[in-house]
Image: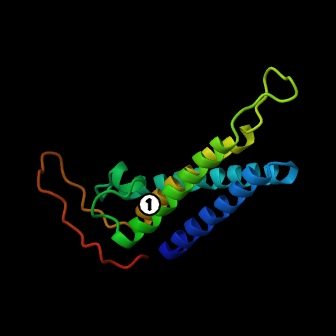
Amino acid sequence: MSGKNILRFNVLATALFGVSAIVAAVVFEGFAKTQGVVVALSLFTIGIATFLWGYWTAVQKSRELEISVAEMYLLLGPAIPKKVKVVMHSCLAAQSVIAIATAIARPNTLQDGAQNSSRGSTLAFGVLVPILGLGLNGLWSATYGTFGARRLKGDSSPAESHPDDRPIG
């Protein structure tokens, strides 16, 4: 999967989640609720797979390269181009905001005199979706990030710096 395809997938998956979660929160009946859960759990599952795929790739490269968790999953530091950081951070932020907003849009309420009703609980599955953003961050950075060479024990020389105007992938 090319770096640009990872970015495109992240944007499209975020848009799909946004539409699905908003429809589920607004309509909140039958199929609308079901599709919201299915989309959220599907994106969560893909997120877990990409998280593990990125981790596996990073472990293989870490024998020769200095890779930090913050650079990999949070895209901090010079290893990732600025353009990629903007797209990936925007998608992760959108996923988080949509998840929280739709989850609190329908709070638990008592229905028909029931003592324990959880009317909006199906929307809570959306809070799992930001794992997709983190997983794609890790996959992109582990595959296409430019990390410095691994430092030997006792070597205090800093890893070389990298400009932010590299190609996206």
| Colour scheme | rainbow
Q: Quadrant of residue 107?
A: top right
**Residue where numbered disc 1 is placed:** 89
Label 1: few (<14), some (14–19) or many (≥20) C-alpha neighbours in 10 Å: some
Q: Quadrant of the N terminus?
A: bottom right
> Which x, y percent locates residue 32?
81, 54
Residue at 32%, 56% in the rendered image:
76
Which amino acid lies under the numbered mark 1 shown in the image of this protein? Answer: His
Residue at 41%, 76% in the rendered image:
168
Residue at 63%, 41% in the rendered image:
104
Residue at 30%, 63% in the rendered image:
147
> Which x, y percent locates residue 96?
54, 51
Question: Which element type, helix, strand or loop, lies under badge 1?
Answer: helix
Q: Quadrant of the C terminus?
A: bottom left
Query: In screen coordinates, is 38 left or right of 73?
Result: right
Q: Quadrant of residue 122?
A: top right
> Which x, y percent locates residue 11?
56, 68
Q: Is residue 53 visible?
A: no
- Image height of 31 relative to 163, above or below: above
- Image height of 132 relative to 11, above or below: above
> Which x, y percent locates residue 38?
76, 52
Query: In screen coordinates, is 85 left or right of 154?
Result: right
- Image height of 35 relative to 118, above or below: below
Query: In screen coordinates, is 83 left or right of 92?
Result: left
Q: Nearer the viewer, residue 150 or 10?
A: 10
Q: How many numbered discs, if any?
A: 1
Q: Is residue 95 visible?
A: yes
